[in-house]
Image: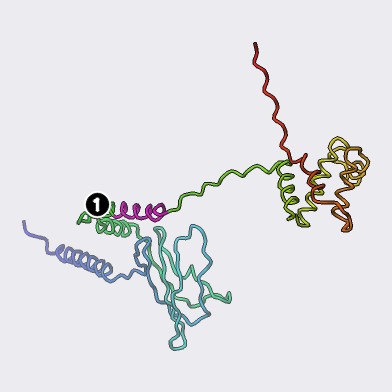
Amino acid sequence: MAADPARSPWRVRLIAVAALLLLGAGLWWLLRTDDSLNVPLGVEQAAIVTYGGPSLMVKPFKWGVGVNLRIAQVSERDGLRVYDIRYLANRAGTFDLRDYLASEDGRPLDGLPSFRFTGDPKLSKDLESRIRETEPAGVEIGGYYTATMAALGVAWLGWLLLLIFYGRPKPVVVAPPSPPPTLAEQFQALLTQVEAGTLDAAGAARLEMLLLRAWREGLVPADAPMARALAAVAAGERTRDGLRTLQHWLHRREATVTREEIAALIRPLAQPPAAAPLPAPAP
């Protein structure tokens, strides 16, 4: 069957139009410009912003913000400020650095260029996988490292123990204190000095004090004042003569009291007390 010559031009025209449309769509796809940049999440990026308006500053940080940024450096060129801005995307989405900048004096940022980018989680996952692949699985050290460190540790501990304990002086054994001398022993020592003529002023004062303490027994209580005790001793029948003799010997140089008389006063008190008799055994 022969083709209709009247329909052929229309078919050709339709094919030509379709071809032109496809060609135009392909050129648009190739020549289209995307004003956003894909950046991986969690990886710091850099952007250079040139602006002639008021000085820029980073807006105060807010919890949950999608982008963290900082101004690393500011320089001037041809009357304009050049800002080196470092930014980091925290989550997926499209962002503009202009939304995170403000002027230091609060004026509006007229004419500030837009800088759009997109946080891409896929790139971040690939980056994390590459980091994991480059991390070593384990560390192997040869040359008997563990055994060597253990031996050094034992040697160091032994050396420390030697420093602490070797040549250390033995603890000094402190003897228990001897019991104080009894009253009879004190009188005996003073009696020896009186008989030898070596009793000094301090010994004479001590002798007077001990004799008064011994003579007041049975006359006044132990806590009685000294004036009362002295009066009781001076009035006592068995003690008044001895007190008079002692005072003449101590306080009167012209007295004729001899050392033998003072020794006679001391000698009965210098005798140790008689031991109590043992009980008789039971029949």
Is residue 119 one of those drawn in magenta? Answer: no
Q: Is residue 194 above or below residue 84?
A: above
> Is 100 displayed left or right of 9 in the figure?
right
The residue nearer to you, when weighing 251 against 69, is 251
Direction left: furthest residue: 1
Q: Residue at x 68, y 20 (%)?
A: 279
The residue nearer to you, when weighing 204 against 44, is 204
Q: Quadrant of the C terminus?
A: top right
Name the kind of residue labelled 1 in the image. Answer: Ala
Is residue 159 one of those drawn in magenta? Answer: yes
The residue nearer to you, when weighing 254 against 101, is 254
Q: Quadrant of residue 233?
A: top right
Q: Quadrant of residue 78?
A: bottom left
Q: Secondary structure at mark 1?
A: helix
> Is 107 displayed left or right of 40 in the figure?
right
Residue 14 horizontal/vertical position (percent): 20, 64
Numbered range of the magenta stretch: 152-167
Which residue matches tag 1?
Answer: 147
> Is 85 displayed left or right of 4 in the figure?
right
